[in-house]
Image (cartoon, rainbow, N blue to C red):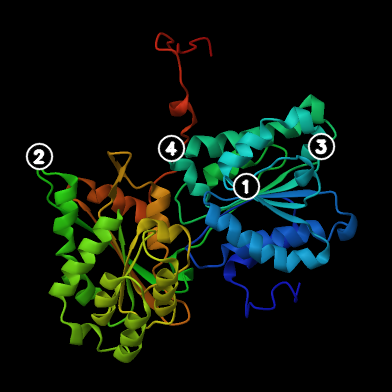
Amino acid sequence: MHIIFKNRGYYYEMHHKAQVLYTDKSLVASAPTGSGKTVIFELALIRLLTRSNIPELRRKIVYMAPMKALCSERYSDWNTKFGTRGINCLEITGDSELDDFSELVNANLICTTPEKWDSVSRRWKDNKNFFQQIQLFLIDEIHILNDPQRGATVEAVVSRMKTLETAQELKNSAHIRFVAVSATIPNYKDIAEWLGTPSKPASAFNLGEEFRPVKLDRIVLGYPFKEGTSDFRFDMNLSYRLKSIIETHSHGKPSLVFCSSRKSVVQSAEALAKDLRTNNLLNHFNAETLHVAAKSVHEHKLSELLHRGIGIHHAGLDIQDRHTVEDLFKASQLPVLISTSTLAMGVNLPAHLVIIKSTHFYNMGMVQEYSNMQVLQMIGRAGRPQFDTSATAVIMTKVQLKAKYSTLVNGTQLIESRYVSSLALPSKVTLIKDESQ
């Protein structure tokens, strides 16, 4: 175990509460971002592996996360840690081609997304031997159950895995241990009750904000949105409010602004460059480093902005330019980085201040709200444990939505089932209450 955790200087209070190494009970852990939830998974892995002959391990472990980037991160980390110990790791997501089921059969630790595992597990009758060997099912970001679009898929997958334990065709299956972790949610015990069984109830615990390594202030700002105003105009107006937020909350440290589109990124950067006084912005940073970087990039607009202490990041930029901006921000050499929201799902770029500029985006010509998962992922970039003791996340939204996002970011939003609402029921079907009970 010392080798597995060689880069971790200490265990968090969470791991003492979880007692995950000393039991095979299913578990739900609700805790703030950065408090060490991933180690819960690793302790559960060790618990299973130490009860087996590793080179001949036939027990399967599935790790399910809502984002491909998370799957890739865990695969890379765990393949390094456990691969040398005879554990065959496999990553299968929407980007993966699974031409031969033998790839799964030969794998011990599988990193996947809900949609991909939904597709795989539907064929369980054709691969009974494989599904009989699954003994540990790890669920990351379990609060995605509340997502209107994806929550039903997660619920269906987990329910299917629970059902397989009792399926007559798999009567020799071992008990599946479910370990689920989440950002802070109020009804974590309800999820534990669902994951457990009457004979094997699941454990559940919650850690408060005092266990967050970097204290996070969450601010939701609501702005008037008059009927007849376009979302594009609303988004543009927010660009001119960034200056005061950055000056108030950045404290001379790196700020990360998320925008809904490439056009919004550039427009926000230009507005900010006009509003902010360059000397004030660069006061706590090495201006010479930025000037050298500005001369090295290909994009003329990016070069201009870097001289002013502002970076931009979106898929339309040259890949080398993107890497240059990422490296500057990681090294705390870039005061402000303005990016599309997709950056939050991939590269890990923590900031002292995170701003979500508008909670709407365009998709196929339609205006949509960010999912809860996307919002939580973006504000999760706030806080740099190695540099900060506090951080701030600011959400800029319509005044009508202020209460909704305040509830979300403060962890008071109940997680409810989305399964029934996702079913395509015939229009004439009426649910009749049974009065006989």
Of badges 2 and 4, nearer the viewer stands: 2
Mark sitting on residue 173: 3
Q: Earlier in the sequence, mark 1 or mark 3?
A: 1
- Residue 223: x %, y % from top left: 15, 54
Distance of mark 2 from mark 4, alpha carbons?
28 Å
Q: Report which residue position mark 1 lands on.
A: 96
Do residues under tags 4 and 3 come within 8 Å of each other at their CB atoms? Answer: no
Report the front residue among 278 and 304: 304
Of badges 1 and 3, nearer the viewer stands: 1
Q: Report which residue position mark 2 lands on.
A: 228
Label 3 crowding class (10 Å Cα cut-off): few <14, some 14-19, many 20+? many
Of badges 4 and 1, nearer the viewer stands: 1
Q: Earlier in the sequence, mark 2 or mark 4?
A: 4
The residue that appears at 16% across and 77% down in the rendered structure is: 276
Report the front residue among 78 and 293: 293
Label 1 crowding class (10 Å Cα cut-off): few <14, some 14-19, many 20+? few
The residue that appears at 77% across and 42% down in the rendered structure is: 175
User: Within the image, what quadrant is residue 119 found in?
Assistant: top right
**Which element carries disc 2, helix, strand or loop?**
loop
Of badges 4 and 3, nearer the viewer stands: 4
